[in-house]
Image (tube, rainbow, N blue to C red):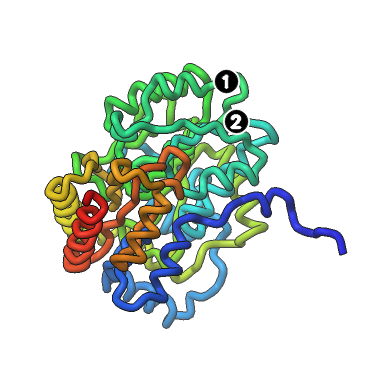
Amino acid sequence: MRNFLSDKVTQIQPSGIRKFFDIVSEMKDAISLGVGEPDFETPWHIRDEGIYAFEKGRTFYTSNSGLLPLREEISNYIQRTQGVKYNPANEILVTVGGSEAIDIGLRALINNGDEVIIPQPSYVSYAPCSYLAGGKNVIINLKAENEFRLTPDELKNAITPKTKVLILPYPNNPTGAIMEKSDLEKIAKIIVEHDIFVISDEIYSELTYKGKHVSIISFEGMRERTLLINGFSKSYAMTGWRLGYCCGPDWLIKQMTKIHQYAIMCAPTISQYAAVEALKNGDEDVKMMRESYNQRRRFLIDSFKKMGLECFEPYGAFYVFPCIKEFGMTSEEFATKFLQEEKVAAVPGTAFGDSGEGYLRISYAYSLEKLKIAMERLERFVNKLRK
């Protein structure tokens, strides 16, 4: 029998994040710091709205674009936080998580051979989704000395006549890096000058610890050449509700909606009703969670300093990215040995691109109690290695 599988699909590697999570799930007394999922439960007033929608029989399809009241609240939220207005009727699409928006956004934009610039380390889905869409991935290896920000020179050097899309992944998973207003201002000028389109993944926009998050859409000439992606998983602790959204020019949203229409139909209806409540009345919940994450962030940075482990201070998301190069091991070797000897799972930096070699992603979306135990085990582990 001949091989019926797609060459493209078989050439993609499985996610490097899941490997250690799957192993630790079978280990007794193990602690996982590997998964980027809030440890908070969805706030009750949001859950109540979902329950009420279920009780009222709101279990039918919505429009392909999503509930109009939800799109209106998304528009209000973007205007409130970034000062930019999107038309709920034709410039906003509700998706099944932010990941679907990444996928169909790339499919709507890319022709075979178009170049897609992807700064790394970054979220594991960008490169495979671009590849499946027919894009040619151009990787920018971000540097720790720049706090893993995308610099103007790095962007300029990556641009060619075939460049079509830049993925802008800030606040960043896995590094926790952010781009401040002054950084984005320089990047925006280059984007406009070279006529490039941007996919700006801002799923962690509410989780920043150094002032207010600034989106690239707020700069002159960028609203019409940016697909803004966000969602409810991280900010509102709604990962299992599977709900995201994207905002962009109507000519793009129209084409993305066609793909969404055929592949998905619509995002989960009950989740959409709950999300309306989240946007209307969830600001205090987000503030509480952000303050808790910030406490954990400071604890981890302080712990690394005490054990002499190099780590730049991240100001976004809920990850730290300590350097383990001093031990002469690959990230995979370090993470495996750490899991085997100390029963703590972290993700090798190489899961997020080759430039992640020599680093470890540690999530602080876990209780302070668990983090304290994990840091005691990490200190013991690195001290043994140093001896």
Instruction: Determine whether, in the image, residue 12 is placed left or right of residue 341.
Output: right
Q: Position of residue 381 (x, y in %)?
A: 24, 58
255 to the left or right of 126: right
Q: Which residue is mark 1?
A: 160
Quadrant position of the N terminus in the picture: bottom right
**Secondary structure type for disc 2:** strand
| Res 115 label | 2
**Looking at the rendering, which quadrant does residue 295 occupy?**
bottom left
Q: Residue at x 70, y 35 (%)?
A: 112
Report how far apart the C-alphas of labels 2 and 1 lie in the structure.
Answer: 8 Å
Pick the residue in front: 164 or 30: 30
| Residue 134 appears left or right of 235 | right
User: Residue 57: x and y, percent?
Assistant: 48, 80
- Whether residue 109 appears in this view of the structure is yes
First in sequence, mark 2 or 1: give its number. Answer: 2
- Give residue 222's quadrant in the image: top left
Q: Are marks 2 and 1 in contact (CB under 8 Å)?
A: yes
Q: Is residue 190 above or below residue 197?
A: above
